[in-house]
Every structure is written in structure tokens, then in C-alpha cells.
């Protein structure tokens, strides 16, 4: 029986994909020669097209409820999410295609607004929209509107998250957890009672393109912490390795309104989704200048939140460990906020 947590972005989802989907593909078809595909389970796939160039492509479905929320809507979310997935592979996004499925009876103005947001976001980044599909389902077949978006881009410095090393420094580009908090508040009917919440959804081209151009070979992993939040990203990076990541909990940036609301729900901000934040594992050799460069790009709240370690005991392999505000240590649980239809 399919459970909600299988699609929530945590370890349960990763294990489900590995067991029921990825392993069904024959081993020799999971990756292209010189490329990175299903064996890596990254934000996208990378194909070696020769002469040091790589084609990156990705696909994702967006089914957020409500389709409009403070800070954005499903159109902005779909364009930003797909663009960011390409960026996190080290690629410069080139083109998008989208498939929009709408329930019979949905107001035409909603569809127009969503499409305008999608186009506006892609235009902001200079990404072409080269095709798509549109379908209408009978009333009750789906709930509202669903968008599937695929994107392609090119890179000479692909970022594959399996490359983390001992001593790598973990940097986040800004406060985490905003998107998960505002969608939860909307679904609970609390937006009018809680002030200061807004999604952080946005494309990260102004950060990642110059960063990869200058420091691409020193970035060993990159991801946007969507479903499952920061905790799930870090667990994906150390899963199946002899490494662990220590998170400095008091250094993780969280906006006051977001933290207060998540505490009210009993939710760890590390497990709440972000849609406009990059998480980076950067070589210890250059992390001070990388962080300074990120600040110069306008991401003034970027900060160091952890490091990759080789743990002293095997039972700590593949774990995320939090250094608490009082100096103690505890394991971080990969428990994504179980809010259905979050992105």
C-alpha cells in the first residue's frame, strides 16, 4: 500500500524509489557512458556529449495545495524548481517543456495566472519554453491543477552529490524552512492568524551560474532542500557511505516567523521545505573565499552550518549529527513535514 511518506522527500521516499523503480531498470541502462543517471539519484541526469561538455536534464511534477500562496504559486514553483534542479547539477539552464493537467471546473483565470507566473519566471532567467501539453480531467479525477516540467541545460563542471569528502564544509545560501511553513499554514487555515510567513520560492541562477563558473571543481555537492528539507538533503549525501555530517544547529538560519510557527507544530526546521535555497558541500581548501563570494552575489545570509566527518564508530556511518546549542550531540531524524501536496 502506498503511503504519503513515500512521496515526502525523506529516506522512505528514497528507499521506495530504489526498491520499486530504479532497480527495475537493467544495470547497463541506468547510466550513459561517461554520464550520471539512475545509480546516482541526483536532481537530474548528466550525459557526456563529448569535448568536455555535458547535457543535464531533469523532470519533476508539482502538485502544491493551495495552488496560490504567499510568495508565489504553482507556476512560479514549477519553473523555479526545474531551473534549480539543473543549476544544482552545475548546469546552465537552456529550455523547459511543461505539461499542465487541470480538473474540469477550475477557473480559467487561475490557469492564466499560473501560466503567466511560469513564463515570467523562465523569462527572468533567460530560459526558453519550447513546448508542452495541456489536458483536462473530469471533475473529481484530480484536485485542481498539476504541472509536470522537464528542463535541459549544459555544463562543463557537472556536480554529482556522491563526491563529498571528509572536511567539506556545508554552506546554506539563506534561511531554511519558509516554503514548508507557509504551505502548512495555508492547509491548516491559519494564514490569517499567523503573520510574516511567505514562501522563498525563486530561481537561483544569479547564485549558481557565477559560483559554478568560478568554483565548480571545489563544489562537491549541491542541492535545493525541497521536500524533506535540509535534513533529507544531508542524509542523501551520506547514505551508503562511511561518512557523516555534523550540523551546527545554532548556526542554521531560520526566519523568526518560520521558526515560531514550526515550533507551534512541533516540527524541526531542518525538516521543513525550502524552494529558494542552495545547500553546498564545499572543499575545505577554499570555503572562506566561496562564502565571501556568495555574500558578494547578494546572498548576505549565507552561512556555514556543518561539516563532513569520518565518524569514530561504524554505527555512526551515514548519519546526520546535530551539535546542539548547549554543545551536546544528537542524531537528526530525517522526518519530512508530512504535509501532502507541498510542491
Image (tube, helix red, strand yellow):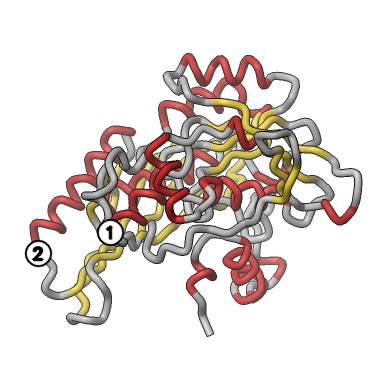
- Whole-percent x, y for residue 116 in the image: 17, 46
- Whole-percent x, y for residue 43 in the image: 54, 50
Query: What is the secondary structure assignment of the residue under circle 1?
Result: strand
Q: Quarter of the image containing the C terminus? A: bottom left
Q: Nearer the viewer, residue 284 or 209?
A: 284
- Disc on res. 132: 1
- Looking at the image, is mark 2 or mark 1 nearer the viewer? 2
Disc 2 to disc 1, C-alpha distance: 20 Å
| 106 left or right, relative to 236 | left
Q: Nearer the viewer, residue 34 or 82?
A: 82
- Whole-percent x, y for residue 235 in the image: 67, 52
For residue 277, above or below residue 273: above
- Disc on res. 107: 2
Seen at 41% across and 26% down, the residue is 206
| 116 left or right, relative to 224 | left
Is residue 51 visible in the rendered image? The answer is no
For residue 110, above or below residue 53: below
Location of residue 89 by image quarter: top right
- Whole-percent x, y for residue 229 in the image: 52, 49
Seen at 73% across and 32% down, the residue is 168
Amino acid at each position: 500500500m502506498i503511503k504519503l511518506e513515500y512521496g515526502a522527500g525523506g529516506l522512505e521516499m528514497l528507499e521506495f524509489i530504489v526498491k520499486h523503480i530504479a532497480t527495475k531498470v537493467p544495470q547497463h541502462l541506468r547510466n550513459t557512458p561517461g554520464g550520471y543517471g539512475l545509480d546516482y539519484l541526483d536532481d537530474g541526469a548528466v550525459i557526456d556529449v563529448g569535448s568536455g561538455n555535458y547535457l543535464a536534464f531533469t523532470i519533476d511534477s508539482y502538485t502544491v495545495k493551495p495552488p496560490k500562496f504567499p510568495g508565489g504559486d504553482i507556476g512560479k514553483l514549477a519553473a523555479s524548481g526545474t531551473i534549480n534542479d539543473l543549476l544544482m547539477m552545475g548546469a546552465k539552464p537552456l529550455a523547459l517543456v511543461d505539461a499542465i493537467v487541470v480538473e474540469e471546473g477550475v477557473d480559467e483565470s487561475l490557469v492564466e495566472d499560473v501560466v503567466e507566473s511560469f513564463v515570467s519566471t523562465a523569462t527572468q532567467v533567460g530560459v526558453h519554453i519550447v513546448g508542452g501539453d495541456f489536458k483536462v480531467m473530469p471533475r473529481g479525477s484530480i484536485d485542481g491543477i498539476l504541472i509536470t516540467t522537464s528542463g535541459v541545460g549544459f555544463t562543463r563542471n557537472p556536480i554529482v552529490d556522491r563526491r563529498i569528502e571528509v572536511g567539506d564544509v556545508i554552506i546554506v545560501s539563506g534561511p531554511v524552512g519558509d516554503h514548508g511553513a507557509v504551505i502548512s499554514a495555508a492547509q491548516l487555515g491559519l494564514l490569517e492568524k499567523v503573520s510574516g510567513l511567505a514562501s522563498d520560492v525563486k530561481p537561483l541562477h544569479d547564485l549558481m551560474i557565477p559560483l559554478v563558473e568560478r568554483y565548480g571543481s571545489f563544489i562537491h555537492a549541491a542541492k535545493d532542500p525541497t521536500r524533506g528539507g535540509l535534513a533529507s538533503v544531508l542524509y542523501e549525501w551520506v547514505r551508503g557511505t562511511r561518512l557523516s555530517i555534523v550540523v551546527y544547529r545554532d548556526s542554521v538560519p531560520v526566519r523568526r516567523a518560520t521558526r515560531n510557527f514550526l515550533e507551534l507544530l512541533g516540527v524541526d526546521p531542518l525538516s521543513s521545505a525550502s524552494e529558494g535555497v542552495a545547500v553546498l558541500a564545499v572543499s575545505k581548501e577554499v570555503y572562506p573565499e566561496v562564502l565571501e563570494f556568495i555574500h558578494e552575489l547578494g546572498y548576505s545570509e549565507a552561512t556555514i552550518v556543518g561539516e563532513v566527518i569520518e565518524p569514530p564508530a561504524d554505527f555512526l556511518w551515514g548519519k546526520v549529527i546535530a551539535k546542539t546549542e548547549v554543545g551536546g550531540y544528537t542524531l537528526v531524524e530525517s522526518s519530512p513535514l508530512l504535509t501532502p501536496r507541498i510542491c
